[in-house]
Image (cartoon, rainbow, N blue to C red):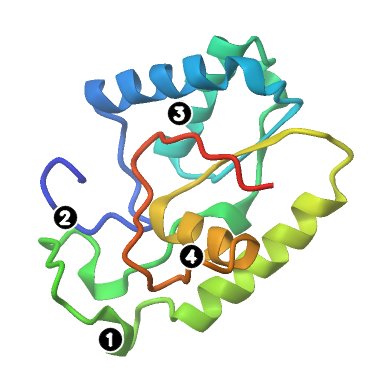
Amino acid sequence: MNVGGRWSGTTETELTDEGRAQAKIAGESAKNLQIDYIACSPLTRAKETAKIIAKEIGYPVNKIHINPMLIERHFGELEGKTWDPDLNIDGIADIETPETILKRAQFALEWLHSIEAEHILVVSHGSFGRALRSLILEEFPFHGPDRLKNAEVQRWI
């Protein structure tokens, strides 16, 4: 749906060939990060991305941990509709609010801190990633202009 410029949120979509290529590049860039745990959103596109990265870094695919807290923001009535960068979505009734996604990200961060692993890779989505990043790095607020690129590996902790 990214290619078509549509809101995808929690809508199930497959990775495109470009998405698979981006995931492979992300895996190549993560090879030296000593990843010892992969946590992933339950959406198909994230799971496929996680599997591609896992194969690239030599991580067992069957040990990828799926956690529903890592799912993308729900965009309600906008799901599947054409994306408009100027639309203020926070006032639309059935869209997950910034407060809710930030609270979910806080729970996810607490869960991540409880994992006995040194280097955790989180495979998630843009809005959720921004929420998580805003909790870890205060200079990047949730509503800031700094977006996350697809299949981009960033080290925050």
Q: Nearer the viewer, mark 4 or mark 1?
A: 4
Where residue 2 appears, x then y in whole percent?
21, 45
Name the residue tied to disc 1: 92
Which residue is labeled 4 in the image? Answer: 140
Q: Residues within 10 Å of mark 2 (few under 14, many from 20)?
A: some
* Dot 2 or dot 1, earlier in sequence: 2
> Would you identify the image quadrant in which residue 90 lies?
bottom left
Q: Which residue is mark 2?
A: 6
Q: What's the CA distance linking mark 4 and mark 2?
A: 25 Å
Badge 1 marks a residue whose secondary structure is loop
Residue 78 x/y as whole percent: 21, 70
Image mark for residue 59:
none
Who is closer to the viewer here, 116 or 76? 116
For marks 4 and 1 on the same chain, the one whose residue lies earlier in the sequence: 1
Of badges 4 and 2, nearer the viewer stands 4
Q: Nearer the viewer, residue 145 or 19?
A: 145
At 34% from the left and 43% from the top, the residue drawn is 149
Is the residue 62 above or below the residue 71 in the image? Answer: above
Mark 3 sits on what residue? Answer: 49
Amino acid type at circle 1 is: Ile
Q: CA distance from mark 2 to mark 3?
A: 20 Å
Q: Is residue 126 above or below residue 31?
A: below
Q: Name the residue type under label 4.
A: Phe
